[in-house]
Image (cartoon, rainbow, N blue to C red):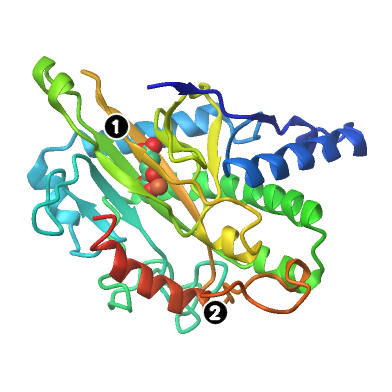
Amino acid sequence: MTVLNLPVVDFGPYLDPNSTAEQRQAVDQAIDKACRHLGIFILKNHGVPDELCNRMLDCIRRFIQLPDEEKRKYDVASKVRGYVQSNQSLVEGLELHYENVGFYPPVNCLSNGLSPTIDPASPNARLPTSPDALGMPDAWPSDEFRAQTDEYLEHILQLKNRVHASIATSLGLGASSRKRFDDTIFALAFNGYQGLTESEVSNGGTNLPEHEDPGSDSDSTSLQVQDRDGKWYDVQPIPGAFVVNVGIILNRWTAGQYHATLHRVVHRSKKPRISAAVFVDPSFETSVAPLPELTPAGKSPAGQKEETFAEFFLDWIGETSESKY
Ligand SMILES: O=C(O)CCC(=O)C(=O)O
Ligand SMILES: [Fe+2]
């Protein structure tokens, strides 16, 4: 398979107080160009400390290395929360050759991740005990895991705000559209791909079938992406850098100007692999209709429904049980 050298965006000027407006503008242009082309790029000098990323990955690795019966305690029978074991067939005849543990805030959450019905000071504020439209609540393997993830997301939030500000500038957005970029929540998929034996290496298929995600992904290594002609490429990762890709919502908001990247994972190695996908989703009440600045005629592209992210997402997870899973 041909290796694709993704555009590499050096985010340094956004973090350096001495950078010039021209340097930051060059970053904006590079991100905008990549989002329009394949919808995917590598972000280096992103400001999230290497040491913190490594600690997060170690924490995920330690969880993935636990005995199966221990991990299964965190299976909450949801598509987006809790543990899903490898080879667990969610649809008859189709197996996923990877395991993952996912986290999704309460669906009635505010953009800060807190449920409006819960006192923010209460210990239940970030760990509701009742099911919502997505099923059972998150199942955190330990307080340490949770604290580690919170610390990581605090840094990712700053980065997300900067990247969204850059995109909003490139797209020439006004205050109301910028608000959609600000009102986001994080969903997480921490994925584990087993090391393979010699014969599995030569006989194996796809681990994570091709898909687009609603929110944009980041922080993963060695995956495959499809270009606009339908050809698949291996992505060449850069240690310490994030892979960032456009999801379905950014594609919709931009009326198709930004490309939602089709991607999949084919892990052919004797070494195990883990990845941390962070999805930036809009808050549930946010519209997923195209931004008014990008649709001068005031019309959505044909076939695109005017709906909130809640409506979109509940449909999407219903559909993915047939198409992605
Ligand atoms: O493991 C990876 O590199 C990608 C994971 C991914 O695309 C996902 O979890 O949606
Ligand atoms: Fe993905």
Furthest residue in direction bottom, as rendered:
117
Q: Amino acid at mark 1?
A: Val
Tell which of 292 and 101 is nearer to you: 292
As drawn, the label of residue 91 is: none
Residue highlighted by disc 2: 285
Q: Residue at x 59, y 59 (%)?
A: 250
Q: Quadrant of the C terminus?
A: bottom left
Relative to 18, say whether 102 is above or below.
below
Relative to 313, say whether 52 is above or below.
above
Tell which of 95 and 257 is nearer to you: 257
Residue highlighted by disc 1: 266
Q: Residue at x 37, y 74 (%)?
A: 314
Give the x, y percent position of residue 246. Answer: 55, 50
- Give the image quarter of residue 19: top right
- Would residue 269 appear left or right of 112 to someone viewing this image? left
Mark found first going from the N terminus, 2 or 1: 1
- Would residue 225 appear left or right of 290 to someone viewing this image? left
Furthest residue in direction front, as rendered:
229
| Label 2, residues with CA under 10 Å away: few <14, some 14-19, many ≥20 | some
Q: Quadrant of the N terminus?
A: top left
Relative to 300, say whether 273 is above or below.
above
